[in-house]
Amino acid sequence: MERQYKYLPILINIFVVILIVSNLVAPKFVAVGWFRFSAAQLLFPVTYIFGDVFTEVYGYSAGRRAIWTGFMASVIMTAFGLFALWLPPAPEFKDQAAFETVFGVVPRNVAGSLIAFWAGEFANSFTVAKMKLWTNGRHLWMRTVGSTVVGQLVDTSIVIFFIFWGQPLGVMAQLIVSGYLFKVTYEVLATPLTYMVVNFLKREEDVDHFDRRTNFNPFAA
């Protein structure tokens, strides 16, 4: 029988909410000097911190469950957003254009975002699990930063190529480098908070999982 944890369900719920909100604010791009990034990048990296916590404390299987929950929630949000967009607006509804800005996504962009999230999160979780074995549970900062270096490279590259395919390679490279550096820096700065959360959960839940016999297949039950 699978062990039940006190904090894991609520953490997965928070993870999904953050993911959904980041998807909603993603269309807005911000310029800070040379750097260009989506407003979602102020929030989306938090999902990778959650991914680190899930795998570090509860193991890869918990991370896998959270990733699939977030993935399906994103699919549902996108599908119902498009359905609501296609419904004919009432004559007194004056915000159709604004509604289209948020939910009028291009199918290629949706596919790119979902694939990028799925691949990046699993790369992140896999790296945390393997590095924990290599370091015998020591040097948490190496795992949180190392997993972000891998996961965010996968995520950022995929989503930029999907969304901005056809743009000059220089523009895509600028977006990839800007987003990637921002997310990795975000993770490094958040390391003290990650330590606090991980140590609290390990102590309160009385668990410190090592994935020694884990099936790392993302599609495993």
Image (tube, rainbow, N blue to C red):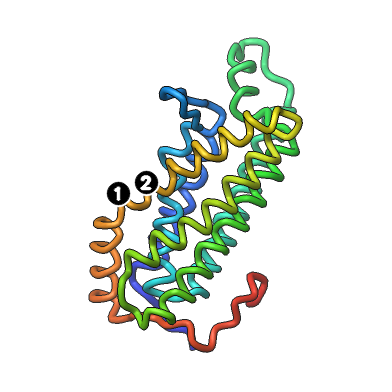
Q: Amino acid at mark 1?
A: Leu
Task: State the residue lying farthest toward the front.
Answer: 170
Crowding around mark 2 (Cα neighbors within 10 Å: few <14, some 14 to 19, many 20+) is some
Q: In the image, residue 214 lies at what x, y percent?
A: 55, 83
Q: Nearer the viewer, residue 77 or 160?
A: 160
Q: Amino acid at mark 2?
A: Tyr
Q: In the image, residue 22 lies at what x, y percent?
A: 49, 40
Left or right side of 38 for 201 = left
Q: In the image, residue 25 lies at what x, y percent?
A: 50, 32
Tag 2's secondary structure?
helix
The residue at 67%/16% (across/down) is 90
The residue at 39%/67% (across/down) is 143
Q: Are discs 2 and 1 less than 8 Å apart at CB?
A: yes
**Relative height, residue 166 to residue 215 (above, below):** above
Q: Mark 2 highlights which residue?
A: 186
Q: Mark 1 highlights which residue?
A: 189
**Relative height, residue 87 to residue 19 (above, below):** above
**Relative height, residue 204 to residue 102 (above, below):** below
